[in-house]
Amino acid sequence: MFYAPMSSRHSGFGETSNPLWSMPLPRWNPCFPLEFYEWLHATDFLCLQLVCECVLCCFSCVWEFEILPCDSEPAFGQMFSSSLAQSFLPEFISGDFDSIRPEVREYYAIKGCEIISTPDQDHTDFTKCLEVLQRKIEEKDLQVDMIVTLGGLAGRFDQIMASVSTLFQAPQITSLPVIIIQEESLVYLLQPGKHKLHVDTGMEGDWCGLIPVGQPCNQVTTTGLKWNLTHQTLSFGTLVSTSNAYDGSGVVAVETDRPLLWTMAVKL
Amino acid sequence: ACKGTHPLDPSRSLKYCLVILNQPLDKCFRHLWHKAHLKACADGGANRLYDVTEGERESFLPEFISGDFDSIRPEVREYYAIKGCEIISTPDQDHTDFTKCLEVLQRKIEEKDLQVDMIVTLGGLAGRFDQIMASVSTLFQAPQITSLPVIIIQEESLVYLLQPGKHKLHVDTGMEGDWCGLIPVGQPCNQVTTTGLKWNLIQFFFSFMDRTFGIIAKHSVQPFLWFCVLETYLTFQEK
């Protein structure tokens, strides 16, 4: 499997004239990064896979993805002409390096990508990568609005949960919103308070949900959903909102007293 | 206590029922099917069964298929109905097909006075993220539906909800993989103690908000007895 590459020719999306970019939390559009994906339909984009040592680095106008060519899938390998591969170099690769293949590490090192070892076994590669990323953002004084993560929502169940856990730790690492996308699922952790999500980009799929992963949320109120909540409790064992949908208004408002995981379908 | 991977261990004589959810069926499915005392599909799970048993479908007929039937293909539903499988509509939109399937299953178990030890569910841990969470949510509701332990298996992952109290898990069947984990889904677990893990806990506060959660996901299990005092998931790899 491979990441669908993102060309720097789409730099226009970084322009501040796009009102969605300048929209601060809580009013933001979880789908707006996905407008980048419109061109992907021409490239047999199939699925995304987490590379433990990498996170998507978003620098002002240019989005770069980590690419992991898979030798066992020659059909996909053909997509990677040397010129293509040259265009998709991450700023850095971090992790404990128990997963990255030696030739992959060597390739990116030779190409000038920073290889940063984060051996701490008390945290996942994703968490540590966010820490490195935040440091880079500060060092370079980058003005960015969010961090988009590809992968982490499939495969080993404990690692899916570990990805979710990182979202809980993210606010201590960075003030930027962190979202995770894999296949048709997007997840984003809503902190306590009020949130307004614009879901009228046309890239939203059919379903959405509110998942009280870490603890019961005792006061949840929503509008804009097919099945709304009014000062209700969401908790595993009582009520979890899954297979919800939209009421067509284009805006979902959520108020919660505890961190609450928002999940939705996205159409890539 | 849950016997972990024993349904897959041919040397054991554990009796179980099988529920198939709407996810690709794993290789272990055939072995599990023939040893199950009652087999059921939840809605689109019937599509999966139908597709993967082409050429030998008559050897893989569930006792019933339940759900709101928004996923099952018409020809699949018709095939199993003609073959005598019970088609049970459970339209309630406040509960998932999985939850409702467990309710029907429990009723069948009581009607037939089946002596089984557990319910094994295939699928539910991949695909749409909200549906993965819905599967987990059903494990929380399961104790109100059935007294039988309910486990979910998909690919290399197995999950089982440990109720408050002490649990002893035998992980020496040879079918365990390299990893396991304790996940405090739903609420923090304030008093967690373990033995038998590579990284054990002594009275840890365990929550998604606590960085110590990250430790558990990388543990490996020694073939040894261990206790957990918490309400979480245990996951470990099936071979």
Image: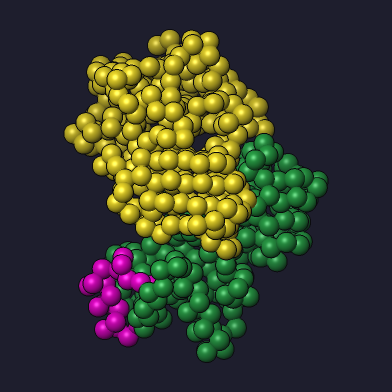
Chain colours: A yellow, B green
Q: Position of residue A110 (x, y in %)?
A: 42, 11
Q: Is residue A65 visible?
A: no
Q: Position of residue A30 (x, y in %)?
A: 39, 37
* Residue drawn at 28 percent across, 75 percent down: B77
* Residue drawn at 26 percent across, 19 percent down: A12
Tell me: residue B117, above or below residue A232.
Answer: below
Q: Is residue A223 visible?
A: yes
Residue B68 included in the magenta stretch of the image: yes
Task: Report the number of numbered marks.
Answer: 0
* Residue drawn at 31 percent across, 67 percent down: B70
In the image, taking residue A12 as reference, residue A229 lies left or right, namely right
Q: Nearer the viewer, residue A97 or A214?
A: A214
Q: Residue furthest right?
A: B202
Q: Position of residue A121 (x, y in %)?
A: 66, 31
In the image, taking residue B65 as reference, residue B157 lies left or right, namely right
Residue B157 included in the magenta stretch of the image: no
Extent of the magenta region: B67-85
In the image, taking residue A166 as reference, residue A140 lies left or right, namely left
* Residue drawn at 68 percent across, 49 percent down: B188
